[in-house]
Amino acid sequence: MQISVNTASRSYPVFLDSGSALGLGAYLNEKFKNRRCCLVTNTTLASIYSSYINTLKEETGCVIHTAPDGEKYKTIATWSEILDTLISARLDRSSYIVAFGGGVLGDMAGFAAASFMRGIDYIQVPTTLLSMVDSSVGGKTAVDHPMGKNLIGAFHQPSAVWIDIDFLKKLPSRQFVAGYAEMFKYAFIGGSGMFTFIMNNRDAILRSEPKQLMESIEKSIRVKADIVGRDEKESGSRALLNFGHTFAHALEQFYGFEGLLHGEAVLWGMVCAVDLAKRKGTLPRSCWTAFDRIMDGLPLPALPSVPDAGKVYEAMFADKKVSSGKLRFVLPCAEGESVVVNGARESEVMAALEKIGEL
Ligand SMILES: NC(=O)c1ccc[n+]([C@@H]2O[C@H](COP(=O)([O-])OP(=O)(O)OC[C@H]3O[C@@H](n4cnc5c(N)ncnc54)[C@H](O)[C@@H]3O)[C@@H](O)[C@H]2O)c1
């Protein structure tokens, strides 16, 4: 299956299938003819998929760069090592990168592609659920800075995204749930059809039922493609993709980015966003039952400790999404629809945060 992403700077295909990984080499050779290539991956994938990576190497002649695994290595230093490999292998402006891994690897390899020789082509081959439904599409590339996540980066759209959902078979279940959170958020921003689809299929998706899993990934990519097609550089509607994230980022900050995966924080963030929407009145009472039903049974992970609502509230102001000192929230207003709201009373936000302790 092929989904088109059409942004102001570039249009590209997302290929979505099951069992398509072995077709990637032929596709790359056809698309890039004799252009040279670097496959960027991490230590975990290099070990799990060593024979697959070797096959790709034989087929395309690519150079391999293996980065350390983990968000703590999503740094300028690791990005710089990727550039060292590109330069030592004498790749040039016509070369391209294959980013083989999850969102951390994809963001970093994408940023290397954005910056090497002022920008070369790259292909995203996402291997986590989160990167399939979210980070591989849309062209946001970045590394972290000690002062905050994704503070250094560029918008640089890939030339294509190649998704084989069979990679999910080896993904640890905790990582699967983290990706499920980013998929679940589309229920709140992807229209009433997406809301109903997620409502009716959320358990089957969690169980990785092939049909529902494939359909949910496809629908998620379509929602994301539509949003980034309208607003590539987040001057408007792309902010909707941050549903639940104002709370999530503050929770991650509160726990010092340890013990809680980003997607896990997003699950809790969505609970708080729905609660705040009820308090602020963006969500009409007539919708509350449907929202209670869709939230019911979310796979909420245990938190490292009960969060201190006051400290989490303070952490919200450190986020790069604060605009002119005002907190910005994405809050639901109807089934599948949300609005961006600038500012909320401290008491309302604190009450929404306290919901966490009640569940
Ligand atoms: N660019 C964007 O638009 C965007 C959007 C959302 C999130 N992000 C970024 O994505 C990152 C999170 O991505 P993630 O959740 O994919 O985490 P991740 O890349 O750290 O991957 C999670 C773990 O799973 C391992 N893994 C990956 N694929 C595997 C597979 N098939 N089998 C077994 N193990 C596998 C990884 O090595 C890693 O240990 C964050 O840095 C976040 O900032 C970017």
Image: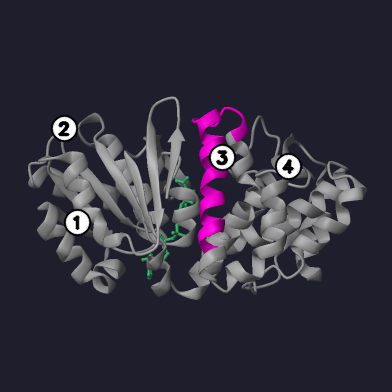
Query: Alpha carbon of mark 4 to alpha carbon of mark 3: how far?
Result: 24 Å
Element type at mark 2? loop
Query: Alpha carbon of mark 1 to alpha carbon of mark 3: how far?
Result: 31 Å
Query: Alpha carbon of mark 4 to alpha carbon of mark 2: how far?
Result: 42 Å
Which residue, given by chain and number where applicable, does mark 3 sit on?
A: 320
Q: Is residue 69 above or below residue 112?
A: below
Marks 4 and 3 in Cβ contact (< 8 Å): no
Front residue of this view, candidates 122 and 11: 11
Which residue, given by chain and number where applicable, does mark 1 sit on?
A: 65
Front residue of this view, candidates 314 and 294: 294
Specify the segment rendered in magenta.
Answer: 213-237
Q: Select label 4 or label 3 by which is in front.
A: 4
Tell me which colouring the rendered structure shows: one colour
Q: Where is residue 155 shown, x and y percent of the image? A: 40, 34
Residue 214 is inside the magenta segment = yes
Front residue of this view, candidates 323 and 199: 199
Q: Residues within 10 Å of mark 3 (few under 14, many from 20)?
A: few
Mark drawn on residue 9: none
Marks 4 and 2 in Cβ contact (< 8 Å): no
Q: Amino acid at mark 2?
A: Arg
Q: Select label 4 or label 2 by which is in front.
A: 4
Q: Amino acid at mark 4?
A: Glu
Locate residue 170: give its quadrant. bottom left
Q: Earlier in the sequence, mark 1 or mark 3?
A: 1
Mark drawn on residue 93: 2
Is residue 255 visible in this depiction of the protein?
A: no
Q: Residue at x 71, y 42 (%)?
A: 329
Q: Select label 4 or label 1 by which is in front.
A: 4
Is residue 48 visible in this depiction of the protein?
A: yes
Q: Residue at x 23, y 46 (%)?
A: 97
Locate residue 55: give its quadrant. bottom left
